[in-house]
Amino acid sequence: MIYLDNAATGGEKPAAVQNAVLAAMKACANPGRSGHARSVACAQRVLACRELLSDLFGGYGFDRVIFTKNCTEALNIAILGTLKAGDHAVTTCLEHNSVLRPLEYLKRTKGVRYDVAPLTDGKLLPEAIAALVRPETKMCCVTLASNVTGESPDLHALRALLPERVLLVADGAQGAGHLPVNMKEAGIDALAVAGHKGLFAIQGAGALLLSGRMEPQPVLFGGTGSESFDLGMPAFLPDRLESGTLSYPAICSMAEGALIVRARRAEMAKKLLETTACLHVLLARLRGWRVYSAPNACGIAAFAHERIPSEEVAQMLSDRFSIAVRGGLHCAPLAHRALGTFPEGLVRASFSPFQGREEADALARALARITSS
């Protein structure tokens, strides 16, 4: 199979990542829960990963790196743990349901209000987002890169337009690992990361990086291995936000993936930009197809046929040509409303840095055969 669904989860894990998982499984213990040598060794490995992620993303120290099982959990902690009744939030039409659903839940149950910034000629303009800020606005939630089109707003420009009091929360599910991110330089207060996409980790790996201004309250309660005498959660980070056993093999895989990204991010981003540009050229030669994305460093290409539904195209690619893509709404309904593709959705092909012209050619040939038949 030609796997072009890397925006959902990375389909090829580097050998170093696979070896890290196997090593973790062969000498596994519960980090931070015991004082024996193996538990301490695992805890030291977890600490090293916190330090690595903080360094990679220009974070605020290892203790402000919270491990989660995915980016969705990280965003829920940031949003549900921070906003309260009377608060207002600003977000955008390109957000994933991992942002929209927590905000909608708070709107229905807590009276939190939020506004959604529109697209301008297919772009998220910082001034359009900042224009929605009110006196009671506490948070601005913005994607690093759309999971539908790969569109990336300028967060540096956005931060400059936002009042200092407004917390900037970035959804890095698609952008982290592909795009250069420095939390301090961009003024990001919370960065949610999916380890299993741009960081090459296995599923079950995610993280939330916090600035000193961001102090979410717990949304999950349980054991932390610290202050067990207290029935309340520990006041300090990361323990306050990490209830239950961490996924040690997943964290080890994310550490190895982060090392790869630190060494090769620019090179891999260039490859993905070239691959998506190549596919756009090929699709432009086919009748009946429209492309909704621009070439991007996240490897995403979104397109649709004028008559064939996106999910039907995706199924034909899988059944007839053994090519894996994703059709439909991609858990981002407002993005499709903004693009005019709701409710049919789009076909999304998402490449990894280990793919290139050969896979783009194969996809274009398959689409040509679908339309000719």
Image: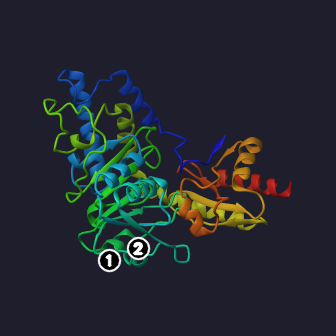
Circle 1: element type: helix
**Counting other residues with Cα less than 10 Å from the Cα at mark 1, is it few (<14), some (14-19), or many (20 or more)?**
some
Q: Given the current orientation, which residue lies at the most extreme right position?
A: 373
Which disc is residue 217 wearing?
Answer: none
Circle 2: element type: helix
Residue corresponding to mark 1? 161
Residue at 38% from the left image edge and 54% from the top image edge: 109
Q: Is residue 262 visible?
A: no
238 or 274, nearer to the observer: 238
Residue at 69% from the left image edge and 61% from the top image edge: 304
Here the colouring is rainbow
Asked whether the beta carbons under mark 1 and mark 2 sit within 8 Å of each other, the answer is yes
**Counting other residues with Cα less than 10 Å from the Cα at mark 2, is it few (<14), some (14-19), or many (20 or more)?**
many
Residue corresponding to mark 2? 129
Where does residue 261 sit, x and y in percent of width and height? Answer: 40, 50
32 or 109, nearer to the observer: 109
- With 297 as the anchor, is 1 left or right in this view? right
Residue at 31% from the left image edge and 48% from the top image edge: 53
Separation of residues labelled 1 and 2 (CA atoms): 9 Å
Residue 319, image quadrant: top right
131 or 56, nearer to the observer: 131
Look at label 1 and name its amino acid: Leu
Where does residue 283 sit, x and y in percent of width and height? Answer: 71, 63
Q: Earlier in the sequence, mark 1 or mark 2?
A: 2
- With 249 as the anchor, is 118 left or right in this view? right
Say if 163 sits above or below 100 in the image: below
Say if 237 sits above or below 161 in the image: above
Look at label 2 and name its amino acid: Ile
Where does residue 176 sit, x and y in percent of width and height? Answer: 41, 54
